[in-house]
Amino acid sequence: MSVIQSIRDKYARIAVIAIAVSLVGFILMDAFTGRSNLFGGGSNVVGSINGKKIKTAEFDEKVKAREEQSRQQGYDMGDAGRQDAIAAVWNQEVTQTLLEDQYEKLGIQVSDKEINDILFGTNPPADLKQRFTDSATSRYNGAAAQAQINQIKKGSAEEREQLAQYVSYLRDQRRTEKYTSLLANTFYFPKWMIEKQNADNNLIAKVAFVAVPYGTISDSAVKVTDSEISDYVNAHRSDFEQKEETRSISYVAFSATPTAADSAAVQQTLLKLKPAFDSARNYENFLAQNNSVMPFYNGYISRSAMRQPNKEAILSAPVGVTYGPYLDGSQNAVYAMSRILDVKQLPDTAKVRHILISTYQRNPQNGQMVPVRDDASAKKIADSVLGLVRAGQSFDSLVTRFSEDPGSKEKGGVYENVFTGQMYAPFNDFLFTNPVGTVDVVKTEMGYHVMEVLAHKGSSPAYKIAYFARPIEASDETENAASTAASQFAANSKDIESFRANAAKLQSKGIRPMTATDIKESEYQVSGIGASRSFVRSIYSADKGDVIAPERIGEAYIVAVVTDINKAGVQSATAARTVVEPILRNKKKAERIKQNLGPITTLEAAAAKVGQPVQPVDSLHFNGNNQGLGFESRVIGAAFNPANKGKVVPEAIEGQSGVFVLRVDNQSALPDAGGSVADQRRFLQQQARQNFMSQMQQGQGNSLIEPLKTDANIKDNRAKFY
C-alpha cells in the first residue's frame, strides 16, 4: 500500500474528530431526528463562539464527513444518526475554538521542525511506523518515509490536500499534548495544607446527641410558596442561572402497539402457510417470496453458536419436522416456525486465511452492495491466485497484492476463532466441512475467496435450519383507534386546565398523564417519549398553555400541552421547585422542631420532649462518615469547636437529615502516625498528575472544557437549521 493510501485511510478516520479528542471526551447529545430548511431564517450562520462565526456551508460539509465516517464504521445513519453527527460536529467546533483561544493566549505552537521530528523521528505515527519498519531489523526507516512524502508533495492537488490535512491533525495533536502537560504540572499541594489535613485527621471527640429526623413531620404539613422559592433563587442566583431556554410539557400517550388480536392474526397466517413451508424445495426463494423477516442461512450452525432463546425446543424437533409457530424471543415481537434440514458433527471454532477478489463491495454511503468487477473476471483472478498459492508463493505477499477484504488484509488474510454461522454460508461450510490444510476457491456474495483452512478446535453437532418468521404489527384497526382517540382528546383540550381535566378521565382506562421538563430547543428527543425532532419543534412553536396536535412517536400517539417556558437567565419558581422545595421544606420543619424543643438545657430533657433517644459516640472523627452521624458537617463542626468542650451546645443544629441537640464530652487528638510531609506532598502531586493524564488519555476531560464554556460567548442557532 502506498503512503498516500495510508494517509487516506488515516484521514478517513480522523478528519472529523475534534482537535482535542485526546484531551476531551464529550458525551454526545441525545440524537435528534428530522431537519428543517438548511438555509432558512435568512441567515447562513449556525452559531458563533467568542465571535468566530460557524457558517452553515462549512458546518454541513463537516457533518457529511462525520456521517460518512460513521457509515464506514457500520453505524446506522438514519435521522437519529444524522443528529448525532450534528451534535458531535458542534461540540467539536466549540471545543476546537475554545482550545485555539487557549493555545494563542499561552503561546503554544508546533514548529515545522517538530512536525518533521514527529514524522521521521524515533516515535512516528503508528501508520507510518507500520509502513516503513524494516521487518528484518524492526527499525523505522525515517528516510524512506520522508522520500515517499516528498513524492506526495509533487503529486495531485487531492493528494497534497490530504497530506496537508494529515499534518494539520498531527500538529493539533501535539499542541494538545503540550497543553495537557502544562495543566498536569499545575497540581500543587502546599505544606500548610498537608499539615492541616494531618492534624484534622487525628482529631477525635466523645459526644452524645439527640436527633429529630425531618421525616417526623409529614411533607404535606409544610407548604412552600412560589414567592418563597423565588426569594431563595434570587439569593442564590449563581446556582440557578441557565444559558438557554427550556420548556416543560404534560402529555398523554395513546398506545398503537399490536393487540392480542393482532398477535393471533399473525399466528394464524403462519399456520395457513405451514403446509407450503413443509413442502418447500427452495427455502431461500420461499422465505423471500413470503416476506420472512428471518432470511435463509444455507449453512451449518453449532448448538453453542445459536443465539435463539428457544433453541432447546427448536433442536428437540426431529430432522424434517416443522416446529411452531412460536414467539421468537430473539426478535422484537415475531412469530416464527423452524425446520431442521440437516445435522453434521463439525468443529466448534476454526482458523482460516483467505484472499478476497471482490465482485461486490459495500457502499459506505448507504450500506448497499455495489458491483465492482464482473463474475468471470473475478473468477479468473482467483483461479490464478490459487495457482500461485499451490506453486508455493508466499500467502502473505499475495494477500498484500490481491486481497480486497479490509477486515483481514492487515493480518495476512487471517481470521481466528471463527464460529459457525459467523461468515457467509459457502465460506462457513468450506471452512468447517473440509480438513485442515485444504486450499481452494469459494464463491460468496462478496466475490471469490482463495481459502486455506488453518486449524479446527472442538467438535459438536451443527444444524442447517430454515426459519420462517413474520412480525407482530399493529393492524389498521388498532392504528386508527389510537389515532382517533388522540385526535378527539386534542380537540377537547384547549388549555392546561381542560387538558388536565380530560387526562384525569383517562386514568380509568390505564392512560396516565406524564410530564417532561428541561426540553432544549436543539434537542431531538424528549425523555420518556422518544426521538422526534419535529415534536421538539412543535413544542417551541407553541406558547404556554397551547395543546400540540397528536404526533406518532414510537408506538404511541402523543398529545402534549406546554406547561412552562423557562427563558434564559435565572430560573423561574416552577423550574427551580424540584431543587429548592426540599431545602425550604426542611428549613420550615427545622423551625417547628426547634419550637417544640424550646430552650436547650440537657440532652435528657430534649430527648423527653421529642421522644428520641440519647445516642453516645465515643470516637467521633473530624473527617466525617461517623456511625450514627454520617457526613453531618454542621454537627461535626460544632463537636470540634473548642468553645463547646464539656457542655451542651446551647442551640439546636439544623443538619441535612434532621435537627440535632449535641453535648461535647471531650476533645482530643490521636498520636501522629508519622511520615514525612514532604513525601506526602510528592506522592499527592504525582498521583494527581497521573490521574489527570489518565483521564485525558481516556477522553474524560469535560471538566476542563466546561469552565471555558461558562466564560465564553457561545450562540447556538442549530435549531433554526436542523
Image (cartoon, helix red, strand yellow):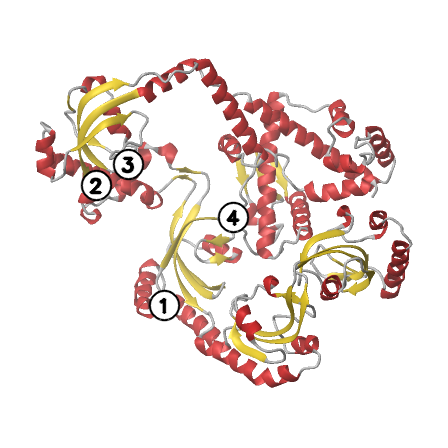
Pointers 1 and 4 in contact (CB under 8 A)?
Answer: no
- Which circle's residue, 2 or 3, is located before the other in the chain? 2
Relative to 528, does residue 656 appear above or below in the rendering?
above
The amino acid sitting under disc 1 is Asn
Task: For label 4, count other residues whose C-alpha is less than 10 Å away and answer few (under 14), some (14-19) or many (20+).
Answer: many
Residue 293: percent from left, percent from top: 61, 71
Pointers 3 and 1 in contact (CB under 8 A)?
Answer: no
Q: Residue at x 59, y 83 (%)?
A: 273
Pointers 4 and 3 in contact (CB under 8 A)?
Answer: no
Residue 395: percent from left, percent from top: 84, 50
Instruction: Give the CA separation, mark 3 to mark 1.
Output: 38 Å
Q: Which mark is residue 214?
A: 2
- Which circle's residue, 4 or 3, is located before the other in the chain? 3
Q: Residue at x 70, y 81 (%)?
A: 281
Q: Which residue is mark 3?
A: 231
The amino acid sitting under disc 4 is Ser
Q: Which residue is mark 1?
A: 492
- Which circle's residue, 1 or 4, is located before the other in the chain? 1
